[in-house]
Amino acid sequence: MVRRPRLDQSIPMLAQGYAWLPDQRRTAGRATVHTRLMLARQTLGVEGPAGARFLYDEDHVRRSGALPEPVVSTLFGHGAVHTLDGEPHRVRKAMFVQLLMGEGIGDLVDRAEAAWDDAARRWAGERRIVLMDEAARVLTRAVCDWAAVPVTDEEVPALARDLTALVDGFATGAPRHWRARRVRQRREAWLAGIVEEVRSGARTVPAGSVLGVVSAHRDSEGELLEPRVAAVEVLNVVRPTVAVSWFVGFAAHALHRWPEHRERLRSGEPAFAAAFAHEVRRFYPFAPFIGGRAPREVQWDGEMVPAGSMVLLDLFGQNHDPDLFPEPYAFRPERFLTDGGSAGTSAVRQIGPWELVPQGAGDPRSGHRCPGEDVTVALLSALAVRLACLGYTVPEQDLTISLRRIPARPASRVVLSDVRPDG
Ligand code: HEM
């Protein structure tokens, strides 16, 4: 039996950030901890493959009504797939799987590479660039073209800033949170209008595009989505794709700290590029935890979980669990390769569905696991190779990554100077 705090822990949680659940586990000396969040609601923190399996069973944990309002009003949007359970979730999720887990993502990667190459030529003429901001623009250009969201080149910087703001403001009471709320209102209204134009025939879109598929999607009752909810789901493709800019910033941080990986990335060996992308996703802090609410009284790890309690899976903690990833604070892409990582003969090793969890766990087709993992790994591998091929200087700046800030990022957002596209 572990101690159950009586006071709400939301403020310590926001103050400690990624270290909050791991610290509580260390104090309790076990993987399962009790805490209180969201107006002192009982909350169970779990970690590890068994804890993840427990959480992803809909019989134990449901999502609807469970996610905090500040997160839904900034990051996900009201009515989003993240907030559904049962049949409505399965039907909506199938749409994302169709869009994001097939061959179509090769075209998205090609567009991102072309947008990066265009931008890199411009960077060469500038005194210095902020890499995370530039990567967000590259990804905005690529994903909007791919998704058939109409945006001119002149509109890209403002849209990239807005999409970044949605990701940056979900876990804080600081001004960036209120900015994210305003951006969501404005961008949902804009996209809802575009969905209505597609439905009325005033705008034509390529068959199979994100905008076309979401506009025509029918829910589990056979109804079209409300235009505002369709806008939410278009944003749920475009916004997290632009969020890959965080990982591009972390990749640059890793190449700065451990430059020995640059040469192997430059060689273009696809398995190493994918392993590097996995290690960036594992090592660096991004999504802190996921959770839902117990629909009835359940038991886990000898603990009674009353109906209505929150259950959280510590994603950052699990990605640094030494039982799963020996020497978890060493940055070693080779851990994801077969053959001990020897150059030329390695392939990416099989990764279990409950093991590496930066984007959730289990089966993305049936559960809530992120359907955008293939997109993330493909984009990050491609852009990490391009980054490794780029010549640049890293001027004096604050590259520290505070674990107290959610979402974490290098403080300077990675400034580069003297950029040379040809290395
Ligand atoms: C869900 C992380 C990229 C689309 C999730 C979840 C996490 C996550 C933690 C929740 C899993 C759960 O609740 O069980 C990330 C991170 C990304 C990323 C760190 C890196 C930038 C993407 C991309 C897309 C995407 C590129 C789409 C192109 C989604 C959607 C869901 C989701 C639609 C909701 C799934 C559901 O509730 O069934 N993501 N994601 N994500 N992600 Fe991602």
Image (cartoon, rainbow, N blue to C red):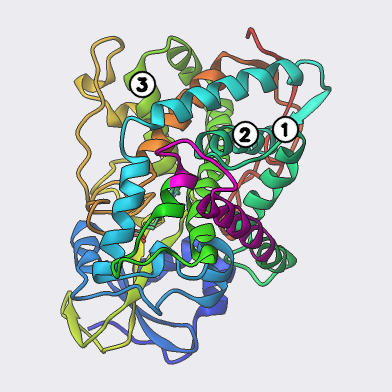
Q: Is residue 47 visible?
A: no
| Left or right of 119 in this view: 313 | left
Residue at image x 54%, y 61%?
A: 75
Secondary-structure class at tag 3: helix
In the rendered image, which residue does mark 3 sit on? 272
* Residue type marked 2: Arg
**Tag of residue 317:** none
Q: Quadrant of residue 361?
A: bottom left
Cβ of disc 2 within 8 Å of ligand 1? no
Is residue 243 shown in magenta? Answer: no
Q: Cα distance, mark 2 to mark 1?
A: 8 Å
Residue at image x 63%, y 50%?
A: 163
Q: Earlier in the sequence, mark 2 or mark 3?
A: 2
Residue at image x 33%, y 84%?
A: 309
Q: Is residue 23 visible?
A: yes
Which residue is at the front of the view, 320 or 135?
A: 135
- Please name which of the two marks, 2 or 3, marks the residue nearer to the observer: 2
Quadrant including the C terminus: top right
Q: Cα distance, mark 2 to mark 3?
A: 27 Å
